[in-house]
Image (cartoon, helix red, strand yellow):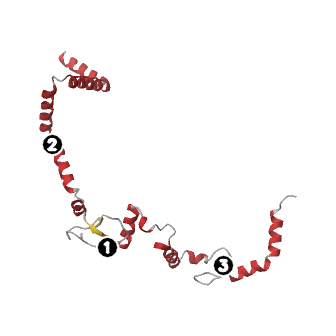
């Protein structure tokens, strides 16, 4: 026997007619009280209403949310949660001069505690984490003049010119450079010849 979907639906409706009609009669919107179909809980206009949207979002805030992890939250998620719940002051909490950009942890243990974080400016954050001194040292190393670089190269060459390993490295470097820039070197060589003639 072949299964016929329409016949099955008719039989089901005839058997459960009273239950279906009662469900359709008793379904009203949660917010406005309008009559609605049995599937939804709200009237169509009510779902687009801002108050309804706020109710829906507030129903799943914090511990009510199924994705809530409690204290086992990750670094970025914890910072976003604290940004939402801790009000941002107009000035840094340490120097009280600049506008704060960063949320810094006070204890070093990333707990879900608003009092364990503070709004501070980037400079104070770098000082607190001791990254500012490292950055200054790096900048000092980088700020070497061209003359200083040339002088250092000469010193290195003078020290290692008799070293056979250094000579091999130099030859290898020269070969690689020549292979990469063959055409450019040839053109340069031809231009020089033409100038001489």
Asked if the residue at tag 3 contacts the one at tag 2, i.e. Cβ–Cβ closer than 8 Å, the answer is: no
Q: Which residue is mark 2?
A: 144
Crowd class of label 3 (few under 14; some 14 to 19; many from 20; radius 10 Å): some
Q: Position of residue 42 (x, y in %)?
A: 60, 77
Q: Nearer the viewer, residue 48 or 14?
A: 14
In the picture, measured across the screen, residue 70 lies left or right of residue 22, that is: left
Comparing marks 2 and 3, which lies closer to the viewer? 2
State the separation of the CA atoms marked 2 and 1.
44 Å
- Residue at 15% in and 37% down: 149
Residue 32 seen in the figure? yes
State the separation of the CA atoms marked 1 and 3.
47 Å
Q: Nearer the viewer, residue 131 or 187?
A: 131
Crowd class of label 2 (few under 14; some 14 to 19; many from 20; radius 10 Å): few
Q: Which residue is mark 1?
A: 115
- Residue at 62% in and 81% down: 29
Above or below, comparing residue 20 to residue 81 in the picture: below
Q: Secondary structure at mark 2?
A: loop
Q: Nearer the viewer, residue 10 or 186?
A: 10
Q: Secondary structure at mark 3?
A: loop
Q: Which residue is mark 3?
A: 36
In the picture, measured across the screen, residue 49 lies left or right of residue 130, that is: right
State the separation of the CA atoms marked 2 and 3.
77 Å
Q: Quadrant of the C terminus?
A: top left
């Amino acid at each position: 026997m072949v299964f016929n979907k329409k016949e099955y639906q008719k039989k089901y409706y005839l058997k459960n007619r009273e239950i279906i009609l009662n469900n359709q009669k008793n379904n009203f919107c949660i917010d406005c009280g309008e009559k609605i179909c049995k599937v939804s809980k709200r009237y169509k206009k009510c779902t687009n209403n801002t108050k309804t949207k706020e109710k829906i979002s507030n129903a799943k805030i914090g511990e009510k949310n199924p994705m809530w992890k409690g204290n086992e939250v990750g670094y970025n998620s914890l910072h976003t949660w604290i940004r939402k719940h801790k009000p941002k002051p107009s000035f840094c909490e340490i120097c009280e001069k600049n506008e704060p950009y960063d949320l810094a942890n006070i204890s070093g243990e990333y707990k879900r505690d608003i009092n364990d974080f503070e709004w501070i400016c980037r400079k104070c954050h770098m000082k607190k984490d001791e990254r500012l001194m490292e950055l200054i040292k790096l900048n000092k190393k980088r700020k070497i003049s061209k003359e200083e670089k040339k002088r250092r190269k000469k010193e290195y060459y003078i020290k290692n010119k008799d070293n056979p390993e250094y000579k091999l490295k130099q030859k290898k470097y020269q070969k690689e450079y020549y292979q990469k820039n063959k055409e450019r070197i040839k053109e340069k060589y031809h231009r020089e010849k033409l100038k001489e003639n």
